[in-house]
Amino acid sequence: MRDTKQTRKLLYIGKNNIALIVLDTINETRNILFADQVAIDENANLQGKVSELLTNAANFLGFNIKDVEMIFDDPQIIHINYQNAEFVDCVCEEDIAKEIFKKAKIDNYFVNEINFLSVQYDEIDKTAKVNCNVCASDYITYKKYVNLLKVCNLVVT
């Protein structure tokens, strides 16, 4: 077996455990190829626990995991609501998302999800009037986990 683009690797970092789940999609059906978790406490070496999970997965799957999608437990998740917010020079949802990411980074947040409720474009003024909900986490917490995974030779996707 080899790592493909259809394979998703999810790493969950919680308060009491770290879990790794490897999923594969074949004919629009998701299959769990590997799932394991290790318990942690406040004095645990997170790098060692992540390495343990990666070793177990590599031994079971027959390939090394080089990138993961990270999910982490953050007690300070905030919800930001944009109501009739105006975004300049935005002609699609991707442009709006980039602006939301920029603002969140300035405010020291990492955007987890953007749920667009409505978008109205004004092509003459090149603006967009947006109603959306944003779920964000503390950027410092996010960056701490990303740096931990970099030490384990993983790329966060």
Image (tube, rainbow, N blue to C red):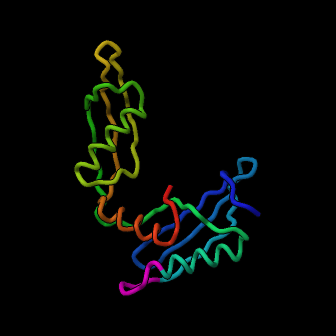
Q: Is residue 67 above or below residue 123?
A: below
In terms of depth relative to the viewer, which is nearer, 117 or 95? 95
Q: Is residue 71 magenta?
A: no
In this rendering, would 24 be left or right of 67? right
Residue visible at 32% across and 34% down?
Answer: 131
Q: Is residue 46 magenta?
A: yes
In terms of depth relative to the viewer, which is nearer, 125 or 83? 125
In this rendering, would 81 be left or right of 40? left
Residue visible at 56% across and 70% down?
Answer: 20
Residue visible at 37% across and 87% down?
Answer: 43
Q: Is residue 117 above or below residue 59?
A: above
Residue 49 position within the rendered picture, expressed as x and y whole percent measured from the top left: 50, 80
Residue 138 position within the rendered picture, expressed as x and y whole percent measured from the top left: 29, 60
| Quadrant in which residue 141 is drawn | bottom left
Residue 133 position within the rendered picture, expressed as x and y whole percent measured from the top left: 34, 43
Segment colored magenta: 40-47
Count of picture labels: 0
State whether the magenta stretch is mostly helix, strand or loop.
loop
In this rendering, would 146 be left or right of 67? left
| Quadrant in which residue 117 is drawn | top left
Residue visible at 66% across and 56% down?
Answer: 7
In this rendering, would 48 be left or right of 140? right
In terms of depth relative to the viewer, which is nearer, 125 or 130? 125
- Specify the farthest residue to the left: 107
- Specify the farthest residue to the bottom: 43
| Quadrant in which residue 65 is drawn | bottom right
